[in-house]
Amino acid sequence: NAGVTQTPKFQVLKTGQSMTLQCAQDMNHNSMYWYRQDPGMGLRLIYYSASEGTTDKGEVPNGYNVSRLNKREFSLRLESAAPSQTSVYFCASSEKSSGRALDEQYFGPGTRLTVT
Amino acid sequence: AQSVAQPEDQVNVAEGNPLTVKCTYSVSGNPYLFWYVQYPNRGLQFLLKYITGDNLVKGSYGFEAEFNKSQTSFHLKKPSALVSDSALYFCAVRDLAGRRALTFGSGTRLQVQP
């Protein structure tokens, strides 16, 4: 199993350009997440998807949109990139088992995005 | 809203010595607490979690964490540090709004000197 995969690994954008970050998991997990990591701030939740067809805003959703394409894939789109969106982006997934949420999240390797 | 604090940006310890990485939390109700480790240019890896039960939780790579409800702390510990333990460590608490997303601390860099 590949676990959680993310593409691309690196990306440089100019202000105002758009792009989509792709994420896929092969663990049959229901829940998927997008975080951004900035120095000294830990990881902050951008969007969350509890299951296929549902999405919910996290702590820092402004400037982003998401699509839960199917159970495996959860994409993050920047419609008009800004320098403040320079960050490392992580996708994660998790599953619920035996009536209790396991909450153990599995993370992808990250996408390093620079907006100039 | 819940929050997590990691008061130390960096912890330095000599190889073979015990290590502690501190974490305090603030939540309404019972906390679900986690520790993750991040090696350079990698995603986060799960180390251990506290949901309920024994206050001392054992995890991967010889790490353990002690839950202390009265002090609202969940410190990460290891009896004997290895150089390979050098990494960035994150404490996290589960979102109690039912989303199962995590709120992370700012991270503590552990440096183990040979």
Image (spheres, coloured by chain):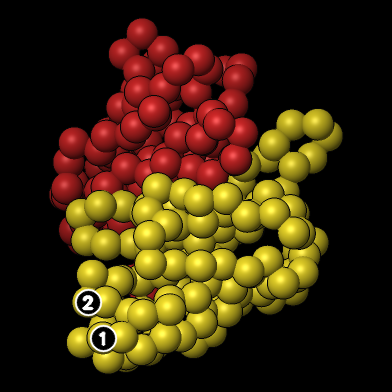
Chain colours: A yellow, B red
In the picture provided, is B63 more to the left or to the right than B6?
right
Q: Which chain is mark 1 on?
A: A
CA distance separating discs 1 and 2: 7 Å
From what the image shows, is residue A107 above or below residue A24?
A: above
Instruction: Determine the image quadrant of residue A27.
Output: bottom right
Say whether mark 2 and mark 1 are on the same chain. yes
| Residue A15 showing in the rendered view | yes
Judge by depth and name the residue closer to the eye, B70 or A110. A110
Q: Where is mark 2, residue-wise?
A: A83
- Tag 1 and tag 2, C-beta contact below 8 Å: yes
From what the image shows, is residue B89 above or below residue B66?
A: below
Residue drawn at 26 percent across, 86 percent down: A15
* Amino acid type, residue under disc 2 in the picture: Pro
Farthest-out residue, top: B70
Whole-percent x and y of residue B50? 54, 29
| Residue A31 showing in the rendered view | no
Residue drawn at 36 percent across, 8 percent down: B70
Q: Earlier in the sequence, mark 1 or mark 2?
A: 1
Residue drawn at 27 percent across, 47 percent down: B106
Q: Where is mark 1, residue-wise?
A: A15
